[in-house]
Amino acid sequence: MEETEMTQYTSERQRGHGGLLFVLGMVCGIVMAVCAVLLAILLFGKRGIVDVATKRKLDLIGEYIDTRFYRTEVDHAALREGMYAGMVDALGDPYSVYYTEEDLTEIMSDIEGVYEGIGAYMMVTQDSEYPVVAGTMSGSPAERAGLMENDLLTAVEGESTAGLDLATVVSRVRGEHGTSVRLTILRGGESFDVEIVRDRIESPTVETRDPEDGIGYLAISEFDDVTPDQFAEGLAALKSREMQGLILDLRSNTGGNLDAVCDIARMLLPEGNIVYTLDRDGNRENYTCDGKHAVDFPIVVLTNGYTASASEILAGAIRDHGLGKLVGTTTYGKGVVQRIFRLDDDSAIKLTVENYYTPAGTDLNGVGLSPDVEVVFDDEAYRADGTDNQLQRGEEVLRELMRNRGN
């Protein structure tokens, strides 16, 4: 942890009756003064973010606020939090965020898979100034209220969400179960408000359906701490019912925990790399699989524009290892890894620290994974009678893979 405040060292000159003590005291004072200057250069030199001029400017801004701002009551803690958040935001990286202690608590509960909110998956994209609904959890307050994929969340309780980072948006939407939140939604050019009562959400991150004609279905909505165990249970149940091929639905899965997705990959892949990362200095880290649990059936992965991050890792690894094909539309293209660094006051920063690559070396950041079979989702058909044309096409592709596997 680097300190951002310089400790001032002062010396007290010894008073003595002899000239020698005077000279020695003067020399010591000079030496300590030089040390203080050197320390200032080290802490606030040109290489540091908070140099002497910056600290002076911050002090001056604070002085003007304290003495000239038209309201006498100013929340200095909020100003400091805003300064920290602004520093990280100025990196221009949509995935690097400053978290207050409260934000961090919510994020960690998110990773654990239990929280209080409405049960909607949201993303901040570069295509819109507003956050977008990427999907809703089955049976959640968001689903019951009629929120839909691609809805834009333009305001929470009347306050605009334009330009806000995802953590801030999520913190405004969430709240104690039993309380309500008013969201303003933009859908197809029409804006409307919807009131949603929050609930306690226990994320069912894995959904399975019994195999039909040997085809099993397993969907992963996000990669939380609870997901590997849920996946293992679901996969075991499908195998016990004589599954010969798997539809793995990663549509609108916006990602999550890197360790979780690697644990799941180790239940599927042969020996080799799952993914590898490179940091800014070119240091490489391999995430590997020993192949002891490699499956012997083909897989079709369903993807869309909200299949992101950890989902892309799994989809890319399945394809690179020759286990199956991708069906749907091009994925989001988030090929970077973030890590959370806790600070001394229990706040934290999340920084993008590495690029990741599929086993074959594909850098998908900003590009995404193109499907082997492109199928644009027919939203009208789905609304009319529940027809899922991407799933239907995926089953056709999987049957072909199963036939080829049997020959």
Image: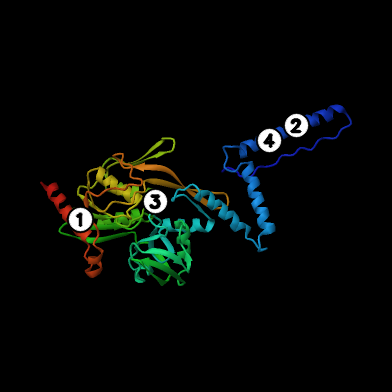
Q: In this figure, which residue is indicated by the disc labeled 3?
A: 257
Circle 3: residue type: Asn
Image quarter (top left, top right, bottom left or bottom right) of the N terminus: top right
Earlier in the chain: of badge 1 and badge 3, it is 3
Circle 1: residue type: Gly
Observer-nearest of 210 and 43: 43
Circle 4: residue type: Val
- Who's the residue at 39% across and 57% down the image? 128
Q: Residues within 10 Å of mark 2 (few under 14, many from 20)?
A: few
Q: CA distance from mark 1 to mark 3?
A: 26 Å
Earlier in the chain: of badge 4 and badge 2, it is 2
Q: In this figure, which residue is indicated by the disc labeled 2?
A: 30
Q: Position of residue 124 (x, y in %)?
A: 41, 56
Earlier in the chain: of badge 2 and badge 1, it is 2
Q: In this figure, which residue is indicated by the disc labeled 1?
A: 394
CB atoms of marks 4 and 3 within 8 Å: no
Q: Nearer the viewer, mark 2 or mark 3?
A: 2
At numbered mark 1, what does the secondary structure look like: helix, strand or loop? helix
Q: Position of residue 26 (x, y in %)?
A: 80, 31
Q: CA distance from mark 2 to mark 1?
A: 78 Å
| Residue 189 visible | yes
Q: Position of residue 202 (x, y in %)?
A: 39, 63
Q: Nearer the viewer, mark 4 or mark 1?
A: 4
Earlier in the chain: of badge 4 and badge 1, it is 4
At numbered mark 4, what does the secondary structure look like: helix, strand or loop? helix
Q: Residues within 10 Å of mark 3 (few under 14, many from 20)?
A: some
Q: Nearer the viewer, mark 1 or mark 3?
A: 1
Q: In this figure, which residue is indicated by the disc labeled 4?
A: 37
Residue farthest left in this picture = 407
- Who's the residue at 27% across and 43% down the image? 292
CB atoms of marks 4 and 2 within 8 Å: no
